[in-house]
Image (tube, grey):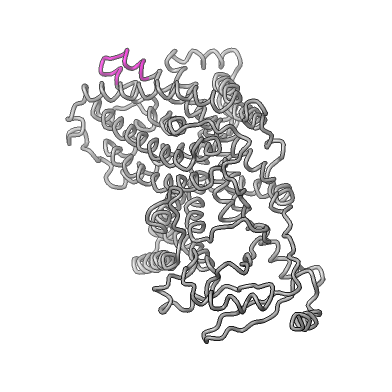
Amino acid sequence: MAGRLPRSADLTRFCQKLNRVKTLEDDMMETTFNRCLSTVDLTLLGIGGMVGSGLYVLTGTVAKEIAGPAVVVSFIIAGFASLLAALCYAEFGARVPKTGSAYMFTYVSMGEIWAFLIGWNVLLEYMIGGAAVARAWSAYLDSIFSHKIKNFTETHIGTWQVPFLAQYPDFLAAGVLLIATAFISFGAKVSSWLNHVFSAISLGVILFILVMGFILAEPKNWSAQEGGFAPYGLSGIMAGTATCFYAFVGFDVIAASSEEARNPQKAVPRAIAISLGLAAGAYILVSVVLTLMVPWHTLDPDSALADAFYRRGYSWAGFIVAAGSICAMNTVLLSNLFSLPRIVYAMAEDGLFFQVFSRVHPRTQVPVIGIVVFGVLMALMALVFDLEALVQFLSIGTLQAYTFVAASIIVLRFQQEKSAAPPQPAGSQPSPGPNEGAGPSELKEYESFSDKLQLVSTDKAKVHREPGQLKAAFEPYLELLSDFYPGEVVTIAVVTLMVSAICLCSILVFGNTHLHLPTWSYSLLLLLFSLGFLLSLLLIWVHEQQQSTKTFQIPLVPLTPALSILLNVYLMLKLSYMTWLRFSVWLILGLLVYFGYGIWHSKENLREPTSRSVSARYVVFPSSSLEETVQAVQPNPQPLTELPDMVTEEAKR
């Protein structure tokens, strides 16, 4: 029985498999895709992903039911929170211009299983998001024609009362998704051109809304007699922020398209910044004019903007707004159908998902199989499912992706630059050659003892510190940290930071309501977890980080991504327990796919470390004295029993 138990070495190798990172090609610009997208193309893709049905539906819903006219403040705070996540995506998109978005960013920094789970969740997020927008598109168009489409379907086809299924099949929503799938499969240039047309119409309608809205604005609608500017107080503003945050989730389409950008190092950060700025401005200004045109408590949540113009006697303007909303929803559909197959392609290309989805059409240069398969699946979901119960999946999947991307930024920023060396086993430290410097705690290898003797003086004179090493100014005070490998303390601190953020937010969300903690324990726990969060930040900050001016870098690292992590965790904990339950079921399905297929077909699993043909290696162990202890270390392929003979032979030479 004891012989069947896994050995510690086997468990270590298994954990290394789960946490192995992706090996990137030397030429990051080489791709099977067509690099044809400019900064303008990416910017309009981002705007199309963000300024959709939310502008025409979300503003009215939040204003009437959650925040009142203070929805303006909610959008400002939500825009700032989204900016923190967008900066992380901008740095990664410029630095790793490969398709896959959050999946790819997590794979190159955190590890394989985490990347797969992120990709698995984003996959569901895009499918539900596209199907939900298609049903909203259908309902909005149907409302213009007095619900004739719905009445015809219920009369001639029938209805059903089944949990999780819609009351009637929505053929219009499924049809528009199939048409959009056909256009997307023609190539990135065609998709971009179509998005340009709909985005231009949508932006034109937004300008029309702002001009007409400010003309018809009545400041008395913010007065005390109508309930005031913030009728639900600060709690209403923050609750509105949590809802408004999801209006900005579409910017990741830019990162997902970076492999098709002509100059991703410059285009991706610029496109993310411009599109997020324009989208935030549109949401803020539209919410201003909407609550000034009519009293906030009289808004129609389903079609607030169009209804506001109808009630002010401008029915023709209401028709223009309705047409603009349909164009805006078209851009969101295109964004979802554009991004989803590319993330699936990235997973399949790495061997973690079924290989059939990694095929790229030779003429259109797009993953056409993934586009068709997932376009049809999305259409089927829109046809039969009641998406109201599933829409919160969008929130939890997006927030989890944002959290891991922010953590990945910290880990990657404090990692040493990977050179074009032979692949090393996952989890192992690469061995520096004779000409490479090493930190004070790093093991230094030399193929002969004479190499070591020639380089001792050079090593002692070298003062440059690599990323992940303790800063020289803090070494006298934190000498204990000098004994770790470069980046090891940072990795531990990032894990501690995330655990502290989860505990801190749990106390904030559940401390008074569900846990009913006494005041003294509530305050004590807040203090302890806040100190843990700040201490983790401090431990990260005292280490050297990469200083590169070649691509865009986030300012104030690790503070900026740490704030993003804290905010994302807080918003995730505000979701209902049913959302977490469904999310757990989806995660279990993902783990079955990974352990049944992905872990065995992973390309990183097929990479074998190349053995070095050396007769002996010498490892130098730094000590506090001027002398260094030198020990001969046997290469892996040969047994340790031959070590004394090899040392004797090397001495004779």
Q: Position of residue 379 (x, y in %)?
A: 60, 26
Q: Nearer the viewer, residue 359 or 387?
A: 359
Q: Residue 360 appears at what percent x and percent y?
A: 66, 32
Quarter of the image with the N terminus in it: bottom right
Q: Quadrant of the C terminus?
A: bottom right
The residue stretch that appears in magenta? 309-321
The picture places residue 284, in percent across and down from the top left corner, at 30, 35
- Quarter location, residue 523: bottom left
Question: How many numbered marks have been drawn onto this rendered protein structure?
Answer: 0
Instruction: Answer yes or no: is residue 577 visible.
Output: no
Q: Kindly report the secondary structure that dominates the magenta region of the rendered protein.
A: helix
- Kindly identify the residue that appears in the image at 47 percent across and 15 percent down: 147
| Residue 410 to residue 441: above or below | above
Q: Position of residue 34 (x, y in %)?
A: 58, 32
Asked whether 515 or 453 is in front, the reply is 453
Out of 634 and 153, give the one closest to the viewer.
634
Asked whether residue 45 appears in the rendered view, the answer is yes
Name the residue: 43% across, 60% down. Answer: 515
Above or below, comparing residue 587 to residue 156 in the picture: below
Q: Is residue 318 magenta?
A: yes
Q: Is residue 249 left or right of residue 156?
A: left
Taking the magenta stretch, the answer to whether it contains residue 475 is no
From the viewer's perspective, is residue 228 above or below residue 172?
A: below
Please tell me in which quadrant of the rendered image residue 276 appears. top left
